[in-house]
Amino acid sequence: MALSKKPVTGMKDILPEEMEIRDYVMNVIKETYGNFGFTSMETPCVENIANLNCKAGGENEKLIFKILKRGEKLKLSEAETEEDLVDGGLRYDLTVPLVRYYSNHANELPSPFKALQMGNVWRADRPQRGRYRQFMQCDIDILGEPSNLAEIELILATTTTLGKLGFRDFVIRINDRQILKAMANYSGFAEDDYDKVFIILDKMDKIGIEGVQAELMEAGYSKEQTGKYLGLFQGMEDAQDPVSYIMDALKDVLPAGVQENFREILESVEATKGDFFKLQFDPTLVRGMSYYTGTIFEVAMPEFGGSCGGGGRYDKMVGKFTGNDVPACGFSIGFERIILLLMENGFKVPGKGKKEAYLMEKGLPTEELCKVLRQAQAEREKGSQILVARMNKNKKFQKEQLCAQGYEAFQEFYKEPLKNN
């Protein structure tokens, strides 16, 4: 079989130009989140298959890259079910590994624990623009903080980071799963049907309110239920203050404290944030993960035409590992999509020193070679980036390639001193 020089479908090689931007963005992320008190941690890329299949990952659980048992544990001839063959899988996100990590090390960690985790995850998904089967995720999470200070800090830290990377005019869409459930309850949907209703509601931006109503009717829900449900959304569109409208409409079914908690998040972020993004209540925001229990949020960037990050509160997830619930909330930046946008916009890493190339003719005497190397070292100590390389036969093409990599100046060194510039 011939060897393939192309990467596996849905995965990609990263060229130096992109890698330089990725390194810069990762440094900005780490520095900014560090200023908010988040500390770096790391988990293995492989997790126990039972953890990955714990009904916390939503649709992602259908996209797991599963790992066969090894050695004597793998008994193909005796296998009857998948459990007989598989004991691990590549992580599909960073939240499930984080919760396992916290459950294992809670006694060694501060409370609340403000975690920053960056790493690759894997999903057997259909590749498309900005979506790969292996991709970098960047998460911040706060575990052990029951108040909405967690949501406020996460939103401010994430938006500050995006602002430092030059993004403007994006929107943080915010909702609460308890508001979503109260709207469904108010409209007469059975609790067991909530997730089915929310999946259809999540299509609102694509098919509109009439399309949502048609799909709900096709799913077997009554005209009275769907009319009452979608009437809430139409009422919010017409209201001067949509939050007040929906809170008043749901006052008999909304859990105590939700209104005050939600308003405090909105008011605190608005009072603190810069003018480079908007915070917007969006009652159609669902978020696909079934583990969310409260506030949910998403980053919408007009230039991408979709989500570039999101997160929310998941207070019941730690309890699946320990038996005791721990308040938890997280926000994930869409790292790959951000890199894609920066690349498409011709982003250049700022604040770099001069990039200069020293090109040496082949056969340069050792004494002259040492002079070139000493000169390069002296310039590097001043902060310049100096590339020392042998001169190719096609020097013009070599320089064109180096210019494309950002090299701004060249020095050439020849065997014959008179040629040296």
Image (cartoon, rainbow, N blue to C red):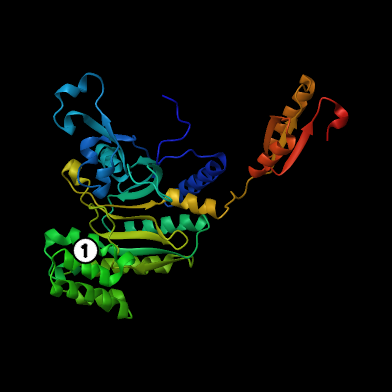
Q: Position of residue 253 (x, y in %)?
A: 15, 70
Compared to 320, does 388 lie above or below? above
Query: Among all residues in the image, which is located at the extreme front?
Result: 1
Please identify the quarter of the rendering in which residue 295 is found. bottom left
**One can see residue 58 in this view:** yes
Q: Tell me the residue at 73%/30% (across/down).
A: 393
Image quarter in which the C terminus is found: top right
Which secondary structure, mark 1? helix
Quarter placement of the N terminus: top left
Question: x, y percentage for residue 12?
Answer: 45, 40
Q: Residue at x 17, y 22 (%)?
A: 77
Q: Is 361 left, or right, of 137 in this rendering? A: right
Against 373, residue 366 (above or below) is above
Q: Residue at x 12, y 58 (%)?
A: 192
* Residue 348 location (% of width, % of height): 59, 50
Q: Is residue 194 left or right of residue 109?
A: left
Q: Residues within 10 Å of mark 1 (few under 14, many from 20)?
A: some
Using the image, determine if residue 211 lies above or below residue 142.
Answer: below
Residue sitting at 28 percent across and 31 percent down?
A: 67
Residue 287 vs residue 102, the one in the foreground: 287
Q: How many marks?
A: 1
Q: Is residue 58 left or right of residue 350?
A: left
Answer above or below: position of 389 versus 258: above
Quarter of the rendering containing residue 102 = top left
Q: Which residue is the site of mark 1?
A: 178
| Nearer the observer, 133 or 190 | 133
Residue type at mark 1: give it: Gln
Q: Inspect this view and state whether residue 152 appears.
A: no
> Where residue 129 appears, x then y in whole percent?
43, 51
Q: To which quarter of the image does residue 277 belong?
A: bottom left
